[in-house]
Amino acid sequence: MTLASEKMISAENVHFSYDGKTEILKGITADIEKGQFVAVLGHNGSGKSTFARLINSILVPTEGKITVLGTDTSDEEKLYDIRRKVGMVFQNPDNQIVAAVVEEDVAFGLENTGVSPEEIRERVDEALKAVGMYEYRKHSPGMLSGGQKQRVAIAGIIAMRPECIVLDEPTSMLDPAGRKDVMNTIKKLCGSYGITVLLITHYMDEAVQADRVIVIDEGRVILDGVPKNVFSNVEILKKAGLDVPQVTELVFKLRKQGIDIDPDVLTEEECVNALASVLKEGKT
């Protein structure tokens, strides 16, 4: 079996309710392959963060099933194995940082699982280098920026060597520079380390960078595909209360005015080239 065809996460008709009455998720079905970078989009209250917590067994489905590499997340005896395979990064990095020194914080999880001191040293250094924070290993987390703290939180998860990392709106509390740092780190996790990444976000420019985008609205998947295909559905996204990338919005408006421009354009560079082609060929 090739890496690309191996299922990391499988959700089958997943329903979830906090109170037994109001359903937050209403039949989510999706397979996520090993090594994929998947962005999950949805407005506040859509159910996307609930879905993230189900994958890590923080919650379990009220109906349906989620498996991680074939293991049912509702199996309490397998809870440790699931959380060893799937790491979780939350919105506020301060909630995950527990030590007074960066390298001690990254080592915290390893120390609690009985890893030898020699291996802890190796894994901590490797994880900090992976997120570009090795030079800050002796610093106090309190002296770091929001983006740097989030990278330290991610390093703490990487050090545990999970096969999948779920990030629940990890950039929502960061400034643009911090968001860029974290997104670069996420892409490196997939590209250089082969880690499966599930990014929960409401930022369109982050979702554009993923291999695949899943859009959840009112507890259901309404769109699922590569970014080009998903973001071409401008009216569906707007109806779901979501913005679209600025480039997509521009292309959508130009096409409504009768200008024959490629609807799959996503990046600024692609847009410039498409507009140049339109002007050169007179396709108006």
Image (cartoon, rainbow, N blue to C red):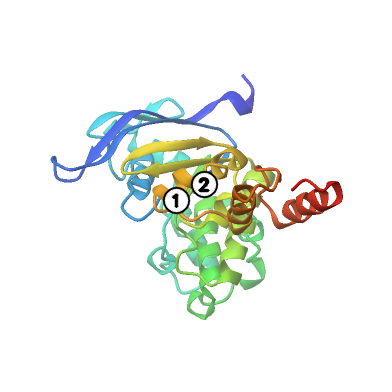
Residue 64 percent across, percent down from the top left: 29, 27
User: Depth check: 83 or 1 in front?
Assistant: 1
User: Depth check: 15 or 263 in front?
Assistant: 263
Residue found at the very far bottom of the displayed protein: 143
Circle 2: element type? helix
User: Depth check: 125 or 96 in front?
Assistant: 96
Residue 140 percent across, percent down from the top left: 52, 77
Question: Looking at the image, which residue is at 61% across and 52% down?
Answer: 248
The residue identified by callout 2 is 234
The residue identified by callout 1 is 238
Residue 226 figure quarter: top right
Residue 44 percent across, percent down from the top left: 35, 56
Circle 1: element type? helix
User: Are the residues at dot 1 and dot 2 in contact (C-beta closer than 8 Å)?
Assistant: yes
Label annotation for residue 93 = none
State whether residue 233 appears in this view: yes
Q: Is residue 189 left or right of residue 39?
A: right
State whether residue 120 appears in this view: no
Residue 184 figure quarter: bottom right
Q: Is residue 62 left or right of residue 115?
A: left
